[in-house]
Image (cartoon, grey):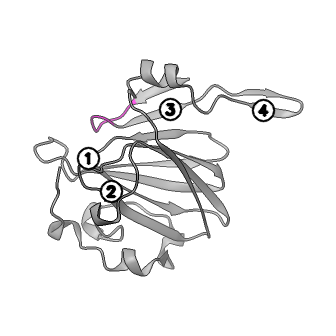
Amino acid sequence: MKVTTLPIEGLLLIEPRIFPDDRGYFYESYSEKKYRDAGINVTFVQDNQSMSSKGTMRGLHAQAPPYGQGKLVRVTQGSVIDVAVDIRKGSPTYGQHYAVELSAKNHLQFWIPEGFLHGFFTLEDDTVFAYKITNFYNKESEIGAKITDPSFGFVWPDSAKNIILSPKDEVLPDFKDFVSPY
């Protein structure tokens, strides 16, 4: 697998090695040893999956300490623009984001450690988003900021004009009003 260190410290992009043949393809989607060797030295406690219609935005979400979660995310069907925002106080990249297209075709994985808000926008109907997390969900520890906040400067495709957003995500604060616990 190829691991790329991204401009915001802690974020990694992982490109697994694909073995295609006449039947289709095979790839190793996770190997504890290989990921530890790549610097992802964590224990995953749960796998989650969501399915979304085209035009759905989810996020930006995180869990406050001590329930913070690292996430290893990928798309198994369809495609998304995936976004992570640095919320680590004192970080030279605080408030900055990194976005990447993840798809069933490109097989990319995105490592997002604790201290980042996370969200995505679906580019296709029936997009299946899968992620491994390092801590269990705790409702009282939910934090977030509005994914539609223009101050982030996210570059969304034209299809983002008619988004599907949950009522919970609609009432998240803009980033200027977000108080980071990290």
Q: Which residue is mark 2?
A: 62
The span from disc 1 to disc 4 (Cα, nearest Å) is 35 Å
> Which of the two discs, 2 and 3, sits closer to the camera?
2
**Res. 144 in view:** no
| Position above or below: 96 against 122 | above
The secondary element bearing badge 2 is classed as: strand
* Residue 15 falls in image quadrant: top right
Q: Earlier in the sequence, mark 2 or mark 1?
A: 2
**Marks 3 and 4: CB-CB under 8 Å?**
no
The span from disc 2 to disc 1 (Cα, nearest Å) is 8 Å
The region drawn magenta spans: 5-10
Residue found at x 13% / y 48%: 89
The secondary element bearing badge 1 is classed as: loop
**Labelled disc at residue 13:** none
The 10 Å Cα crowd at callout 1, few under 14, some 14 to 19, many 20 or more, is many
Q: Earlier in the sequence, mark 2 or mark 3?
A: 3
**Labelled disc at residue 115:** 1
